[in-house]
Image (cartoon, rainbow, N blue to C red):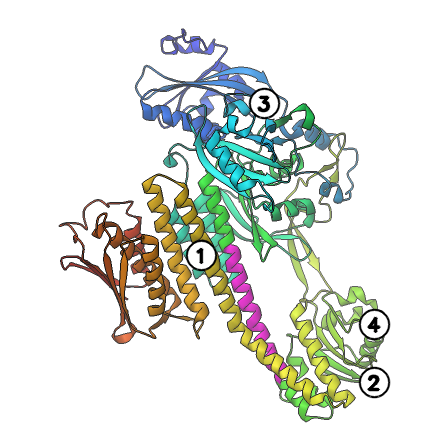
Amino acid sequence: MSPAIDLDALAPHDLDALQQGVIQVDGRGIIHLYNRAESLFSGRRPERVIGRNFFTDVAPCTHLPHFYGRFREGLRRGRLDDSFSFVYGFDPKPMQVRITLRDAAVPDRYWIITEPVEALEAGHRRDAVQAAVNQRVRAEPVDPSLCEREPIHVPGAIQPHAVLIAAEIDGLAVVACSANVRDALDRDPLGLPLEAVLGADLAGRIRASLQGEGIDPGRTVRERVVLAAGLPVEAVAHRNGERIVVELELAPAHPEDFRSASQLDMELAIGRLRDADSLEGAARVAARETRALTGFDCVLVYRFDPDWNGAAIAEDKDPDWSRSLLGLHFPASDIPAQARALYTRSKSRFVIDRDYVPVPLVATPATANTPVDLTFAQSRSLSPIHLEYQRNLGVNGSMSVSILVEGRLWGLMIGHHRQPHYVAPETRAAATVLADAFAMRVYELESRRLWQEQQAHLALESDLVRELARSDDFVSALTEQAHTVLDLFGARGAATVSQDSVRSLGETPPPDAIRAIAGWLRETLPADQASYATAEFPAAHPPSAPFAACASGLLAVFVDPERRHLLLWFRPEMPSTVTWGGDPRKPVLAGSGPVAVLPRRSFERWVEERRGISEPFAPWQVAIAEALAQAVEGVVLRQQRKITELTGLLADKERLLAQKDLLTREIDHRVKNSLQIVSAFLQMQRRQVTDPASQAAFAETAARVMSVARVHDSLYQAESVEEVDLGQTIENLCADLAGMAGKGHAVDLDAEPGLMVPYRKAVALSLIATELITNAFKYAYADAGGRVAVSVAGETEGRIRLSVCDEGQGLPAGWSDAPARGTGLGMKLVRAMLDQINARLEVENRPGACFTVTA
């Protein structure tokens, strides 16, 4: 728009006559005027939008640093005068426009002017997808592997909120870039070295971290820089094969403009996750805390089963959103194999606006035929089939963060939003960390549950083995004593087959049917396979279908190589219903034209009734059955190795029982190692920044992480897995803090030996000690070094007294009401920990400051 046009001087009908779209908003973004041209562009009538928030309600796709962030910056400067390119995903014709932000004459009024530049093709082949939906010539299901062959890692485009450049690894010359590169750079980068594009400092760090041999794929370099436009840009570089890919994204200049997760938010969220005592409870906490961090309308914890079908096991959502996916199951074809492989390698994916127009990649002529692999690119454009799936689901903005347990894709943390939804880079990183914390909690909870179940069964097996050792008749030993084979595995029926003799316990098929099952197993099982387990036995052995009520599940193990003796356990049918999100039998439909397949359009609840299926036998239960059969073999065959084998089995049992504590210690060891890695990473980051405040923040955070690591280290070394030697923990912690504080600082410790306290209290007291000691180093002695005295002692009724005293300048008068000298986060954390363990804090000057905690 020509600057000569004075919008403030035009009457409403004159504004409606303009060819440009004109919107007037106030400082909050509330629309006060919406002219005719803008109404034609957007398809929204003025009376439907006036009085609503332009950025969050009417056009949430603009709630980005690139648009809303510029608006807020102009308001802070007291002068709104900016112009930039933008793409509206108008349906059906997206449009590239030129946006101008300008002050209005009326106080607290501002103009948003839209000038069309060109109409664009619909994004993601939406026209082709929609045509295939409307003109489909085949309605039958097709091979789901068609989806699995889609090359989603090389889409040839990115999402428009970012700019991407790719350079060859050897010379770091740029060989490809996104077509919107001028949004972040002031030149065409193709053919130029990275130094000329990103500056020598950032290019040097990329070269130092990502060049050379043995670099892990996906390793990243992340830094916030200021490029040509003078605005902060989040730069993320990673290596993939023989290329380095750099993504540039305009970042929020002020965190308060966009939801941003803080360190304290993360600490509290992970603390709540740690307090959850069951998998279901931890999943609910993870969904709730992730939604609180990211602001999505709905967050799901989605778990895969062994066949890669998925289920929503936890959900936290906006009460106004009526659709609930909690408890629904989804077929494996909804997330095909190559998508799961991508989730395993690249842990997070965020989509701001489902209807975005992809930005294509352009390359130098020499590399035009070699697509850029975007496996690890955060801004990678998504499959049009996946985005149509989201449209059918009623979802616009979305998030998927991988939950990896022991390196395997256990599930996903999924975020859904009904409108476009921007999540700031810091918050995306926090959501990924929270998913990792949940994965660790899953591993811990599932491991402990598994070992508890195994311990109970191993105790029963031990009793049975003792009876076998005292008996010449294995059938009698297993079926006529206080404990029998029926007590194992939660079975309703059990049987032994010895030669042609059958002994049954509980609910089983008749003896003739059991003999027939034994004969079928002898013929069916390979010679090197002694055991057989299934939860769908009637389907595998149709003659047993009449006995499904008691024998839908079967675990059988041969005792001897000749297969004359057999142990069997039967589980009853568990008629059940599985509620799917749509009919799982028709997950993929054939398309037409350039779209080979179409995603499901219906997610209505579809109930499947299952018959002839029992609760499955776990692999460890099969292993115990095989071990029991080996013990029986010694009795049946009357060999001299009987005592040796039984003694070995008892020793194995004792070792397995002892592994419960070993497992817990291993978990603590892993947690300690992980926290030490995080602390080391923070120390590295501290050395890479020059701002003193940032260095101090990194150092304080590293100290807090190290304090928790020390507690886990004490747990790992202690005799008890539930209590910590507090004196030893504080001693190690003081040594760490004195070392981190540097030359001239020292800690004098007086710790009562053998002072054992519960884990949670040890964590809280360690964090409090960390904050008080580091504060003494920082403030008590100004710039000089000094000594801090720390004492730890027990009191009556199991309480603990922790004192941290210095000989410095003491506390000023009214210090408790004065503004914090730093961020104030340290004392907030101290108070939070005090509340958590119901402790009190006493402070006095001697003249140095002395803090005493009684817990």
Q: Say if residue 234 shows up in the picture.
A: no
Q: Mark 4 or mark 3: name the one nearer the start of the chain.
A: 3
Mark 1–mark 2 contact, CB under 8 Å? no
Q: Mark 3 or mark 2: name the one nearer the start of the chain.
A: 3
Q: Position of residue 336 (x, y in %)?
A: 68, 46
CA neighbours of label 4 inside 10 A, class few (<14), some (14 to 19), many (20+): few
Task: Indicate left or right for 452 with 529 as reference.
Answer: left
Query: Considering only vertical position in the picture, is 121 above or below 678?
Result: above
Q: Which residue is mark 2?
A: 499
- Of 686 and 815, nearer the camera is 686
**Disc 4 secondary structure class:** loop
Spatial distance from mark 3 to mark 2, Cα to Cα? 78 Å
The residue under label 3 is which amino acid type? Pro
Mark 4 or mark 1, whichever is nearer to me: 1
Q: Which residue is mark 3?
A: 94
CA neighbours of label 1 inside 10 A, class few (<14), some (14 to 19), many (20+): some
- Of 425 and 489, nearer the camera is 425
**Disc 1 secondary structure class:** helix
Identify the mark at residue 676; answer none if there is no mark: 1
Mark 3–mark 2 contact, CB under 8 Å? no
The residue under label 2 is which amino acid type? Gln
Residue beneath the point at 16% across and 59% down? 844
- Of 617 and 191, nearer the camera is 191
Q: Which residue is mark 4?
A: 527
Mark 4–mark 1 contact, CB under 8 Å? no
Task: Indicate left or right for 687 with 187 as reference.
Answer: left
